[in-house]
Amino acid sequence: MRIDDYVAELGRSLAGPPGPKRDLVVEARDSLADTADALEAEGLTRAEAERLAVRQFGAIAEIAPGYQRELTGAAGRMLGTLLLISVPITVVMWSAIWRFYPYPPAALASWAARPAWYNAASRGLDILQLATGLYGGLSLLALSRGARWHLRPQLVTKWLGIVVWVMLPVNGLLILLLLYGADIQGINTYLPAILANFLSAIFWGLQLYGATRCLRLTRAVCASPGLPDPRP
């Protein structure tokens, strides 16, 4: 098999974030090309050098699982970074809104008459969101290239996806309870709240997408043979 055919097959066998996947495939191509160049300099034809370089590099079935684990870790790092950034922004944004709301005089009475559970639910929402962001940060640290813990990246990535899928519906229910359960008048037309809802929806969509990708990739890794990762 020539280098181009091998690299194309390797790319088709991998799934994961486009950027890291492209980097891995390019790295494999460069390594193969360097080996083929050295073999060609020893007197082999280009075709023979490429075929020998491919054989020395390893079969796709042996190489792909290690690369797939690397892509799974990359997906976990992306989701961890997203949580570490987006969750504190969401908490600060909504805290500021509730701090300065209500500004319409007509809403003061409903705000003063809010239920006793309202403050507890609001504090609980903040704690849950911050805990999710903290977990994302810890997962990012565990999946970093400089980490020295002997952790399986697919497990860290899998649990990160599970945490997001569990926490987001809970957070969503608490937010709906705060917005509508207390019958706070004017919140639906309060421009900062409208913008905050829009931005929060974008963050949640990205988080769910990242969590779904993490769970899908961890299933792919678990379905692959437990081979050692060939990458340093």
Image: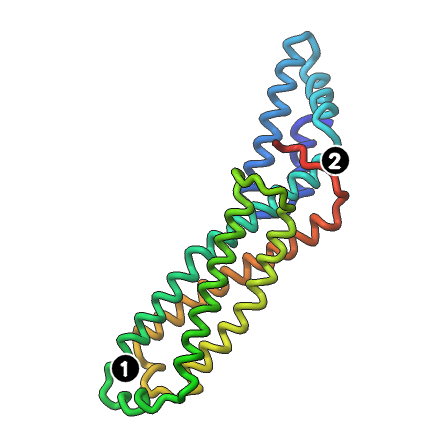
Q: How many marks?
A: 2
Q: CA distance from mark 2 to mark 1?
A: 62 Å
Q: Residue at 22% of width from left, 88% of height from top?
A: 105
- Point 66% across, 36% down: residue: 8
Identify whether 34 is placed above or below 63.
above
Quarter-of-image position of residue 68:
top right
The part of the image, by quadrant, that contains residue 215 is bottom right
Label 2: state its secondary structure: helix
Q: Is residue 81 left or right of residue 25?
A: left
When the figure is inspected, residue 181 is found, relative to residue 210, above or below; the finding is: below
The kind of residue tagged 1 is Pro
Where does label 1 land, which residue?
Answer: 102
Q: Position of residue 138 (x, y in %)?
A: 51, 52
**Which is closer to the viewer, label 2 or label 1?**
1
Disc 2 crowd, CA 10 A, few/some/many (<14, 14-19, 20+): some
Q: Are marks 2 and 1 in contact (CB under 8 Å)?
A: no
Q: Which residue is mark 2?
A: 62
